[in-house]
Amino acid sequence: MLNKLLLILFLTLTLVLGSVHATALAVNIDTGAKIFEAQCAGCHAGGGNIVRRGKTLQKKALERNHVDSLEAISSLVTNGKNNMSAYKDRLTEAEIQEVSAYVLEQAQKNWKN
């Protein structure tokens, strides 16, 4: 009986959470901020972009470029694209999730602390 209840609970949580990864639930925004400062701020200070003006980390630009979800940002950080380097060999999956969550949160706050 207990096994059935656990199975039902697991399936319910799976349905409720949908495609959200477990690592995305446990991200640390403070760690993401530190990773951003060390790895990203050189090109993306304050959510800008010194290489390609239209490819900023501002909410409108993320939406326009279809990179406005945790999954999309994580994929871009992991694999890179065009002038954006891939970070899959420099950051762990957890670090990628943390910095991606930080970017998304900052974009939603318009990069204001």
Image (cartoon, rainbow, N blue to C red):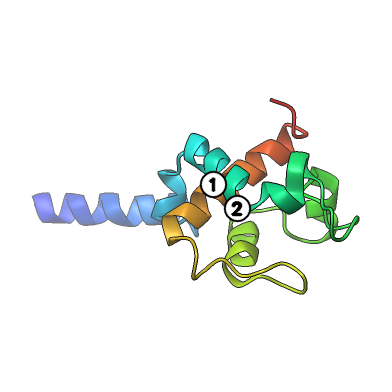
**Quadrant placement of the C terminus:** top right
Q: How many marks?
A: 2
Q: Is residue 12 toward the left or the right of residue 108 in the image?
A: left
User: Mark 2 to mark 1: distance in Å?
Assistant: 6 Å
Q: Residues within 10 Å of mark 2 (few under 14, many from 20)?
A: some
- Residue appearing at x 78%, y 34% in the figure: 110
Question: In this figure, which residue is indicated by the disc labeled 1?
Answer: 35
Question: In this figure, which residue is indicated by the disc labeled 2?
Answer: 39
In the image, residue 92 lies at what x, y percent?
43, 61
Q: Of the residues shown, which amino acid type is indicated by label 1?
A: Ile
Callout 2 touching callout 1 (CB < 8 Å): yes
Q: Of the residues shown, which amino acid type is indicated by label 2?
A: Gln
Q: Is residue 56 toward the left or the right of residue 5 in the image?
A: right
In the image, residue 33 lies at what x, y percent?
57, 39
- Residue appearing at x 65%, y 45% in the figure: 103
Q: Is 18 situated above or below 101?
A: below
